[in-house]
Image (cartoon, rainbow, N blue to C red):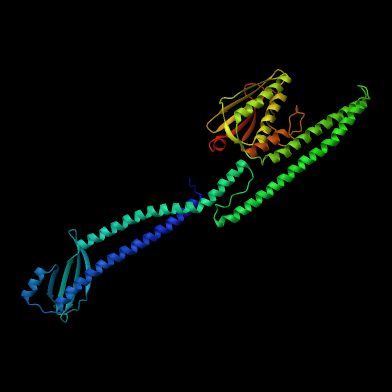
Amino acid sequence: MLSKRSLRRHFISKLAIAMIAMLFMILLALSSYFYSSIMSNLEDEIQTQAKNITDKEYSETELALLKKVSPYEITILQNHDNQNIPTKFVSSTKEGKHFLFLKQSYNNDEMILEITRDYSKEYENIKFMIFISFIMFLFGIFIIVFYSSSVSKKIVAPVELLTHQFTDMHESLLHKIEIDDLPTEFQKLADSVNLLVTKVGTSIKYRQELYVGTAHELKTPLAVMRLKNQITLMKYKKHDKIRETLEQNITSIDTLNAMIHNLLEFGRAEGAQFEQPQRVNLIRLMANKCEEYELLANSQNRNFIYHFDIPDFIVNLQQLLFMQIFQNFIQNALKFTPEHGLVSLNTHMDADNFVIEITDEGEGLDEEKDLFAPFQRSLESTGAGLGLFLAKNAAESMGVTIDLQNREESAGAIASISFPLNRFLLKD
């Protein structure tokens, strides 16, 4: 879910590291404060006891009684060197116990006082406090990671919402992004995207009108030219050179008409991109069309059969774009298949795609050519070479994959349309 380049992962790591470092510093400071406080209290306690001893002169009997009832180990020695010994605390460990030792001179450096305090219980308390701090640190890491993940999710949520809307836009094509649920910081971005969508939509609309308008304007004079050529053709005999020229003119006009028809289809396809997908049963839609293609094949002395391996495949579909692909593939298969040949349509579903395959018995494809390029056609074709180009554009707009391959076992080609299930089925 979180890749190395994930913005959310980067935010979680930065926030978690900063907060864990801060927690560590706080717990370290508190532990140091508690440790120093306990040791300072012990030193004050020992110093108070030392002051009580040095401020008063004890007889040997009183001193022996004091050593017996005191929780401290007290030793008083004669300072033979009369050397000043400053107050000094030393910690030591002996037989698993912990001691704090004080040594100082007093009574004008004539005497030396030594006091030893067993602080093993306080040491255990310090260890327990450090253990609790460590547990708190681990628990704090868990809370920090959970909190960082939650905060990052809320921060990245607008980006995910925009991504989801962009994905939907690809499915239902161009529409404006809803900005009501977006934070203020993202609304300007959404407004910019909506402006871009409007400009793209306007551009495509004008281009569609240009293609359609130009195609209609060209059709009329070509129709007049063809009619005049046909009328003039009737005045000449079969082997007359002028008649041959007129027949060539008519053929050229028919070719131009085919190209204009394809341009008209391209303009309509531009507009079809704005068609809102409708929920349809793709199997039923193809079955109805296949009945028509079966009649068309019979009229051309060809055979057409179809088989669907599932009874239903319900998807959100732009029918005009799909029919542009479907019709082009079947018509090409019928055109290149010789008389009494067979064109078949089959469907199958694998783990990732629902696939439609149209198989013909023609001469096959020249695999060195990009047949999806505009004005690219085979030698046997009499068309303008725009059909497969339009089919490719329609497929990209819909989000399906189309492909052309030669058959392996015999002559002919296989045209396929693949519907990704994670796009057309699982989201429905």
Residue sitting at the far top: 340
Q: Nearer the viewer, residue 101 or 410?
A: 410
Total numbered circles: 0
Task: Report x, y in % for residue 323.
Answer: 67, 32
Residue 119 figure quarter: bottom left
Residue 360 figure quarter: top right
Q: Is residue 167 visible?
A: yes
Left or right: residue 138 compared with residue 49: right
Task: Report x, y in % for residue 93.
Answer: 20, 62
Q: Residue at x 15, y 80 (%)?
A: 107
Task: Report x, y in % for residue 315.
Answer: 58, 34
Q: Is residue 89 visible?
A: no
Quarter of the image for the C terminus: give it: top right
Left or right: residue 98 compared with residue 235: left
Task: Report x, y in % for residue 140.
Answer: 36, 55
Left or right: residue 373 compared with residue 422: right
Q: Residue at x 77, y 43 (%)?
A: 210
Q: Nearer the viewer, residue 193 or 108?
A: 193
Left or right: residue 226 compared with residue 358: right
Q: Is residue 228 above or below residue 238?
A: below
Residue sitting at the far bottom: 108
Q: Nearer the viewer, residue 98 or 140?
A: 140
Residue 212 figure quarter: top right
Q: Residue at x 35, y 54 (%)?
A: 139
Q: Is residue 159 above or below residue 262?
A: below
Q: Residue at x 60, y 33 (%)?
A: 280
